Amino acid sequence: MDSLEHILALNLKLQIADIGAAIIIEEPPYQQLVDAGLAHLHAFDAEERNHHALRIKYDDKITVYPDIIGDGRTQTLHVANMPESGMTSLLKPSQDHLEFFNGFESFGTIKETVDVKTTRLDDISILPSIDYLKIDIQGGELQALQNGVQKLASCIAVQMEISFVQLYENQPRFGEVDVWMQAQGFMPHSFAEIKRWSIAPTIRNNDIRQPFNQLLEADIVYIRNPIEWTDMSYDAMKKLVLIAHYCYSSIDLAIYLIKKLEEANEIPKSSVAAYIEFVRGPKP
């Protein structure tokens, strides 16, 4: 059975950037692409103690950067007292919003503040143009994107953390992020994860992590709008097929793009059928 990259006749590696990369329990969505040698990972993690573990995990398939991505200015880093809370941020936690949720007063307690020099994504000369971006930097996502438009000019997919509630002061709201992304030619594709949290002081089953209905944050996936992106290159379409299939199991999106490639005579007319057979897997 043909591999997907053979069906697509794609010989290029994807360039993936993960801003806020660290070795965590959850497998990142791009894992299969990197493991299969279909992509090179550019990982940004300001904690140098994490770099060794990243290099051990990905070997020669990764380039690690120590830069703190922002707008290029010196900013104040608010270091959380509990590193495992993941709330260390360039933004100051909003006390009123933290108090709204069970447990977040502790999660957002700041141990110290440190002045740090941030780097614009567009100013990193050794970083190639990015095809696929994953970003989770605690409220700093929009600023990073706005200062990386050149590196992301050919980006076809973005997964980012967005917040429905401003856990940090001056944190861009989800609506602001969405308006900006759609203005850049992206469309929302899916929620990779939606997180809810219980409102203080009510605790469900004696567990603050068991929510009722209140939305907290989510990982949202954007793709280049294939309906409006009239100058999308064939290679970009092929790369988006790989991301749709391997990262999100979005078989319908993959078939839509493969059909467009067939119609353009970029790949054989039998490619949709070949992909469906690929999805079904080998017959017993």
Image (spheres, rainbow, N blue to C red):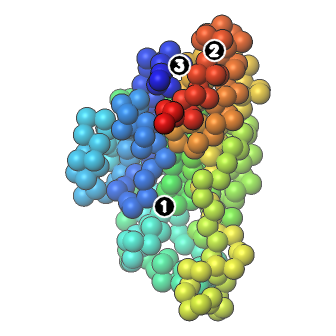
- Left/right placement of residue 54 relative to residue 155 reads left
Residue type beneath disc 1: Leu
Q: Which mark is residue 191?
A: none
> Image point 67% across, 48% down: which residue?
190
Q: In this figure, which residue is indicated by the disc labeled 1?
A: 90
What amino acid type should be assigned to the residue bearing mark 3?
Answer: Ile
Sequence-first tag of 3 and 2: 3
Tell me how far mark 1 sits from mark 2, CA to CA: 51 Å
**Element class at badge 3:** helix
Q: Which residue is mark 2?
A: 270
Residue found farthest to the right: 228
Tell me: residue 214, above or below residue 238: below
Q: CA distance from mark 3 to mark 2?
A: 9 Å
Percent position of residue 162, x then y: 62, 57
Q: Which residue is mark 3?
A: 7
Residue 196, position as x, y percentages in the image: 64, 71
32 with respect to 136 (left or right): left
| Residue 72 appearing in the image | no
Where residue 17 appears, x then y in whole percent?
Answer: 44, 39
- The residue sitting at 51% across, 54% down in the picture is 136
Is 101 above or below relative to 55?
below
Q: For marks 1 and 2, give the one nearer the viewer.
A: 2
Q: Position of residue 104 (x, y in %)?
A: 54, 80
Query: Of label 1 and label 2, which has the lower sequence position?
Result: 1
**In-image side of 247 versus 232 (left or right):** left
Identified at 36% across, 38% down, the residue is 35
Viewer-closest of 229 and 111: 229
